[in-house]
Amino acid sequence: MDSRNPNGSLPQLSQPPKYGITKPISLAGPSEADVQRNTELEKFLIESGLYESKEEAAKREEVLGRITEIVKIWVKQLTRQRGYTDQMVEEAKAVIFTFGSYRLGVHGPGADIDTLCVGPSYVNREEDFFIILHDILAEMEEVTELQPVPDAHVPVMKFKFQGISIDLLYASISLLVVPDDLDISCVSVLHNVDEQSVRSLNGCRVADQILKLVPNIEHFRTALRCLKFWAKRRGVYSNVTGFLGGVNWALLVARICQLYPNAIPSMLLSRFFRVYTQWRWPNPVMLCSIEEDELGFPVWDPRKNPRDRFHHMPIITPAYPCMNSSYNVSVSTLRVIMEQFQCGNGICEEIELNKAQWNTLFERYLFFEAYKNYLQVDIVSADADDLLAWKGWTESRLRLLTLKIERDTNGMLQCHPYPNEYVDKSKLFPHCSFFMGLQRKEGVNGQEGQQFDIRGTVDEFRQEISMYMYWKPGMDIYVSHVRRRQLPAFVFPDGYRRPRTLRHPSQHTEKACEDVTRSQSGSAERRIKRKHDDEAVDEKLSKPRDCSTSNFGGTSHISIGQEAKLEHLRTGDVDSNSVDRLLDRDKRYEEITIQQARTDGQGSLTTCGLTSLHVDNLSIVRNVGSREQ
């Protein structure tokens, strides 16, 4: 076996750290068929537009240079204001590092740049970074969409510089002067720094370690570019929603590179699905052994740390302090991820048998055709800039709604949060929408007509959202149940619902996935009955209406115009009869005409002189018709 240097090639077997904590599964290289499939894969990536142009690459370098100049001037100003000598002012500087997809070399057109600003010990995060530097950036014409997130797990300042998205972190190290050649991979850089700085520094440290621990960097990059594209197309790319983010996918791919050190990207892609469909979670994925250091930072260890025992899909970072990078993954999202792994594995097997092409693997997941019932979460704001912060806060907590629903239904009602956001372009006010698929847990025979009442669950979630520290008037959240037939048109790519006969455009993809995604339980007679029920509901909803729910600040408002009709519908069956009726359990289609209706804090529906209707803990209301808010 040939041995090459770390710039893109294979190490000798005498260097076990390159192969991780176990021996490789196979040292086999590519066959002629593998080489041909690899050529076809690389051609597909280029045709899919996954590589940026030289012009865009040059612009990114220019933007990084400008940001470096800005932070250096910022540190010099602070140094002078704090009375340091002229020599200190002259030497004062901050250094910019990159991490994430840009550092790993797998970023595509329009991708953001993850950056870290490392400053001296006397420049702090709370005031100097989030106030003074923020104000400097806010005054610059090149900077738009400036959004500070100081209370995040890793505090970050988000903005666009000349149209390029930047995520800027800050770490203060225990040096008065930051050298230009600072080596942040050295553990000594973590001496006397706070935990937020450790987390900020670790983004760069982890990226550097990954590149050191893979046998062939170029093969790793191509395979990772494929998997990130696949994950986005299949709806499982999102750390904040409870799926996997960029660093998680990088670590998973890097481990496959270690297990198959001589494999080329097409082989790595196939082996990726083959290995992870058989992986016995929660056994951790690790690129190297976990080492403790005299600095005393906590590392991932389920033997010592009780919280680590509850992680469902641990993917451990290779840089000290080693941590689980996928702690957001829940039972729900792990189930969805594994279903997609099974689907990918089936398609890769067909590709190897020349029964499918690469484009089949990367076809979009038809989320809005996979379930019969959905939760729709609408986020609105009076101002477009406020919506950025309000949406960020709400989106970061959507995964908690998934956890709460499964907790309150004992896991019988499963959720599939979808990471994509949607905007109704016909609405002029700032807003966006997120969706969750709902279904009964497979393999469990529920009673006919069994209901799931999740009103209190959503009400609890709403109250947690309402505690946003920077809330402003106009910020609101609307949660509603929608059946598949009532999904708004703006969620479909072409702006309209696909005809039923065209529901599955890819026979390969859906055939490979049908056994691992959604099973249709019940007899043929029950399915026919449900179809008739759906048609009856569609006919009932055919009249235009204007009705929406507003849940915020502990009050459930039903915002209605001069006249509106609230239908007494159950939220549908998560095999057509599963989520509880939300208003009246007995009169399914009865309509109530209300003029200028509202609810008080206790959920009592007041009708301006008419008899009031008590709606206990009203948290989800069936939104009908145009959904004007």
Image (tube, helix red, strand yellow):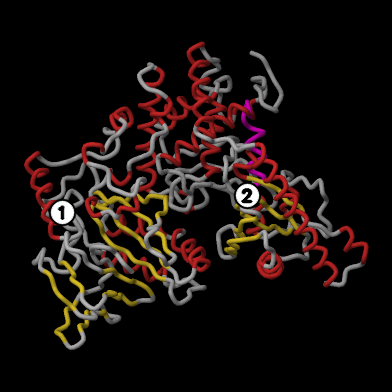
Depth order, front residue of 141/105: 141
Q: Are marks 1 and 2 in contact (CB under 8 Å)?
A: no
- Helix, strand or loop at label 2? It is strand
Compared to residue 406, the image places residue 431 above or below, namely below
Q: CA distance from mark 1 to mark 2?
A: 46 Å
Which label's residue is closer to the chain start, 1 or 2? 2
Question: Where in the figure is residue 42, as x and y percent of width and height?
Answer: 53, 25
- Residue at 79% in and 58% down: 72
Q: Quadrant of the N terminus?
A: top right
Question: Where in the figure is residue 34, as x and y percent of width and height?
Answer: 49, 16
- Helix, strand or loop at label 1? It is loop
Question: Where in the figure is residue 430, as x and y percent of width and height?
Answer: 44, 65
> In which quadrant of the rendered view does residue 409 lie?
bottom left
Which residue bears the numbered disc 2? 114
- Residue at 64% in and 58% down: 195
Compared to residue 47, the image places residue 469 above or below, namely below
- Residue at 43% in and 32% down: 276
The part of the chain drawn in magenta is 204-217
Q: Identify the disc placed on residue 577.
A: 1
State the count of labels: 2
Q: Amino acid at mark 2?
A: Asp
603 left or right of 316 in image: left
- Residue at 38% in and 50% down: 418
Q: Amino acid at mark 1?
A: Asn
Depth order, front residue of 166/174: 166
Q: Main secondary structure of the magenta part?
A: helix
Compared to residue 474, the image places residue 125 above or below, namely above
Residue 125, visible in the rendered structure: no
